Amino acid sequence: METIQVIMIIVWSVAIAVAILVEYQTCQIVAVALVPPGIIAVILAAFNVHWGIQIPTFFVVGAACIFASRPLFKKYLQKAGGESFTVKNKNVGQKFRLAEDVVDGKSSIVIADVTWTAKVSLSESNQTLAKGDMVEIIDFEGNKAIVKLA
């Protein structure tokens, strides 16, 4: 394998990993659409296709995936009544127990067998919260639940 071929395989593999990590952190169903073009770019790099073709291919296929997948995902995330079916709409106002002690204003809660980061609201940050305390979800920021003492 040529050096540039190995470098491009590494670059595209890192791009795939970054897209997955960004999607994990934001849950906006956009970054995940960059995984298929990343895989195509890795394949092109493995077959030693010139990087001048790999880069435009990544961006063209990525744009196509974003424009094609976003409406599909939004369609499947809608309830029959048109209300968005999200964890936020379903759980704001609900009460949960902290799964661990609050450290630096953060803890975790379990919603439907999924552990979420719980960020203590600024108005509650001066109170001491510990594992097992009941908190109420007041909002979501990305994939973090903003909570206050219940």
Image (tube, rainbow, N blue to C red):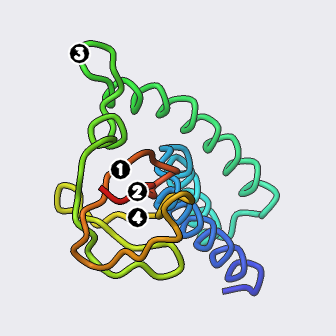
Q: CA distance from mark 2 to mark 3?
A: 29 Å
* Quarter of the figure with the N terminus: bottom right
Residue 26 position, x and y percent, is 52, 54
Specify the amino acid type for callout 1: Ile
Foreground of the two, 1 or 28: 28
Q: Which is nearer the N-term, disc 1 or disc 2?
A: 1
Q: Residues within 10 Å of mark 4 (few under 14, many from 20)?
A: many
Of tags 4 and 2, the one toward the viewer is 2
Q: Which is nearer the N-term, disc 4 or disc 1?
A: 4
Residue position marked by numbered label 4 in the rendering: 118
Specify the amino acid type for callout 3: Ala
Foreground of the two, 74 or 132: 132
Relative height, residue 100 to residue 143 (above, below): below
Q: Tell me which corner region of the image, top left, top right, bottom left or bottom right, holds residue 88.
A: top left
Specify the amino acid type for callout 2: Val
Q: CA distance from mark 1 to mark 2?
A: 4 Å
Q: Tell me which corner region of the image, top left, top right, bottom left or bottom right, holds residue 18.
A: bottom right
In the drawing, what numbered circle is on residue 80? 3
For the point 70% across and 73% down, which residue is it?
8
* Quarter of the figure with the C terminus: bottom left
Q: Which is nearer the N-term, disc 1 or disc 3?
A: 3
Secondary structure under badge 4?
Answer: strand
Residue position marked by numbered label 2 in the rendering: 147
